[in-house]
Amino acid sequence: MTARTPSGHVVDTGGREGEPVPGALPQVMIEPAPLPLSVLELATVGSGQSTADALAATTRVAQAADRLGYTRIWVAEHHNMPAVASTNPPVLIAHLAAATARIRVGSGGVMLPNHAPLVVAEQFALLEALHPGRIDLGIGRAPGTDAHTAIALRRDPAALGAEDFPQHLLDLLGLLGDRRVEGGLAERFTATPAPTSSPDVVLLGSSGFSAQLAGALGLPFAFAHHFGGPNVQAAVELYRESFRPSPALDRPHTVVTANVLAADTEEDARRLALPGQLMRLAIRTNRLRPVPSLEEAQTDPERAAAEAMPSNAVVGDPGQVAAQLRELATATGADELMLSASTHGVAERVRSLELVAGAWGLVPEVTAA
C-alpha cells in the first residue's frame, strides 16, 4: 500500500487584504502537509434525526473529504446502537464510492468474526471491480456490539470467541488473491471470477495482538486511538518490530485514528464537541442514546460528568488542532492520521474538515471549469 503525500499550497480566501471573510479558511501561509490525513465516519444519528438523515450527512462528509484532499474515508461496523447508522459497511461503501470521484473508500472496519470470510471476500472483490484502486478492507476482530447482538449475528454462541480470527483472516487474504496463503478456502472457492485488482487489506486494532499479526503478515496497521486507550505507542512499536515485508507492503504503514473537532475559535470548538463527549459517556456507561443536539447538550444532566471524563480528543481552533496532530504524529511515528469528528450537525463536521485541511496543507481537488 502506497500512501499519497500531498504537496503544500497557499490558501486564498478571497476578499480584500486584512478583511475577514465569514466562513472562509484562515488567510495564512500553509506548509506542505507533513503526512496524509483521512476520515473515519460512524454515520451518527443525532437527536431528532432519522437513519436517512444520518446517511445523507455521511455522504456530505465523504464528498467534502474527497474535495479537500483527504486520502481515504472509512465507515465503521456497529450494530444495535441508537447513535450509529453504519451497520453494513459494504453497502455504505458502495454508495459513498459512487458519490465521490477520487478518495479511497473502505471499512474501519468489517468485524470479521461476525461474517463468513467468503462473504466478505465476495463483497469487497465486487466493490473493487466497481471502483478499482479505491477500495480498502479494514478488518477488526471485535464484535462491534454487545454479546446478545453478536449471538444474533453469528447464530452460534460457541462462535463468540476470536480464537479462529487468524485463520479466517488468512482465508480472506487467500480468497482475495494473496499467493502466500496455502490451503484454506482459496483451494476450492474464488471471491470473483476474473479480478484485475484487489482491495487493500488493513488490520485494525487497539492491542498488541492485532499489531503483531499485522506485522507478521506484512499488512498496514490502524490503531484505534480514538477509543481513548493509552497503548498507542506500545502497539505501533510492536507492529514495527514484528513487521515482515510482503507483496502488499514493503515497509510498515501505521494509521492512527483520533477524535478531532476544529472550529473558528477554541470556544466554539469546545461547545460543538460537547454532544460527542456525551455520546462517548453514554457508550462507556452502557446507556446508549442518539447524539444530543447542541441545545440539549448545554443543559444535559450528564454534562459535568462528560466534561470531566478523561479524553485524548483534539479540539480547538485550526492552529491548535494542527499543532496537536503534529504532536500525535511525532509521538506515534504514524504514517497517516485518520480523523473522526463527533458532534450533532453535519455542517459543523464538514467545517471541521475544511479548517483542518487548510491548517494542515492538504491540496483540494482541482475541478475543470
Image (cartoon, rainbow, N blue to C red):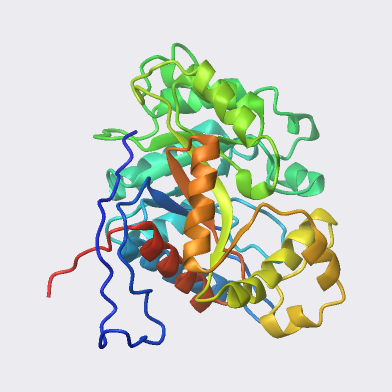
Q: Position of residue 276 (x, y in %)?
A: 68, 66
Work out which residue is located at the far left of the displayed protein and give it: 369
Quadrant location of the N terminus in the rendered image: top left
Q: Tell me, yes or no, if residue 107 can be seen here.
A: no
Q: Residue at x 30, y 64 (%)?
A: 29
Image position of 167 with respect to 316: above or below: above
Residue at image point 25% right, 51% down: 7
* Residue situated in front as seen by the camera: 221 or 267: 267
User: Residue 67 occupies which quadrant of the picture?
Assistant: bottom left
- Against 55, residue 225 (above or below) is above
Foreground: 85 or 306? 306
Of the 4 image quadrants, the one containing the C terminus is bottom left
Choose top left, top right, bottom left or bottom right for residue 84. Answer: bottom right
Name, please, the residue furthest toward the front.
18
Tag count: 0
- Dividing the picture into quadrants, the one containing residue 291 is bottom right
Q: Position of residue 66 (x, y in %)?
A: 34, 61
Q: Residue at x 28, y 43 (%)?
A: 133
| Depth order, front residue of 348/131 | 348
State left or right for residue 37 relative to residue 313: left
Residue 8 falls left or right of residue 136: left
